[in-house]
Image (cartoon, rainbow, N blue to C red):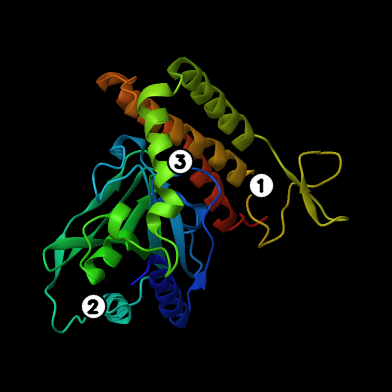
Amino acid sequence: MTLQEMIFRLNDYWAAQACAILQPYDVEVGAGTMHPATTLRVLGPEAWNVAYVQPSRRPADGRYTRNPQRSQRYYQYQVIMKPSPENIVDLYMGSLDALGFDTSKNDVRLVEDDWESQAAGASGVGWEVWVNGAEITQFTFFQQMGGIECNPVCAEITYGPERLCLMLDKGQGFWNDLQWNENTSYRDVDFQLEMQDNVYNFEVADTSMLFQFFDMYEAESRRVIETEVFWDAEQGILTSNPMAGVPEVPAGVGPRALVYPALDMALKCSHIFNVLDARGAVGVTQRAAYINRIRARVRACCLRHVEQYKTPAAK
């Protein structure tokens, strides 16, 4: 099976389960979980059912393409269902059948693996899913995001599409055995990007400049999330001009804060930290401090995001 066909099949399957098929987020992230469609939208009471592919960057995982199944940039297929359906495990098994894994004949195991992201202040309970001894999916029921309780609890399913394709085709590695479609290989698409990013991440990245970038993006994220916005009823828009609007924002518009721009800056901090980590520029004690700084920015965004769900006090 090609990677393209696998994504098509997952899209078709989850669309049939009433999921909206979204597009990747256009900021560097370390996992599909950091897409705002997960980070922000798992919070709050409203139903939210989506699926999407997300390119994910983990600079320290790069191996100059010499490891056949490990790279610094790869793809995740993410499913979020809120609230979590009672038959979510059955739905997941159905997705494996749709891909060509016969769950009645293959050894499918749910191995307990509670999950945590320190940088996102997120945690949940769930499983790694193994098929015939190989891990293929992370299955998590979110309990917290940004240190805020998720109510209702939602289900997150994260597939590794490259590995799934190799398993179905009995291939050994991304760079020699994986096809993007019938005419184009995975190597054709991503080999040069992977090789060059490895050289940058491990050898060339200017650490002094990146430390400055981290401080700048952190400061901008803080400034933006603390910027007040108002509702201009005449034009039907948000504005930062207090003379043109009023504090009360209509339902459905969102919170009185620029959550998404502030989160973009926090995601930039996270990616810069990951490059610095790959360069060996962050010590053990520094590492914890930087993760705490990223978590503080993500949490600030999540806190402002959930303000829209609070019931105003009666006057």
User: For this view, does 194 lie left or right of residue 307?
Assistant: left
Nearer to us of marks 2 and 1 is 2
Q: CA distance from mark 3 to mark 1?
A: 16 Å
- Label located before the other in sequence (3 or 1): 1
Q: CA distance from mark 2 to mark 3?
A: 39 Å
Q: Which mark is residue 214?
A: none
Q: Which residue is located at x 64 percent, y 43 percent? A: 258
Whole-percent x and y of residue 86?
Answer: 31, 78
Which residue does the numbered mark 3 point to in the structure image? Answer: 299
Inspect the image, locate mark 2, and give the three-letter code of the amino acid beneath it. Phe
Helix, strand, or loop for circle 3?
A: helix
As displayed, is residue 185 above or below residue 282? Answer: below
**Residue in view at x 49 percent, y 53 percent:** 40
Q: Identify the disc placed on residue 101.
A: 2
Gap in angstroms between the C-alphas marked 2 and 1:
47 Å
Q: Which mark is residue 256?
A: 1
Whether residue 233 appears in this view of the structure is yes
**Residue 155: image x %, image y %?**
34, 66
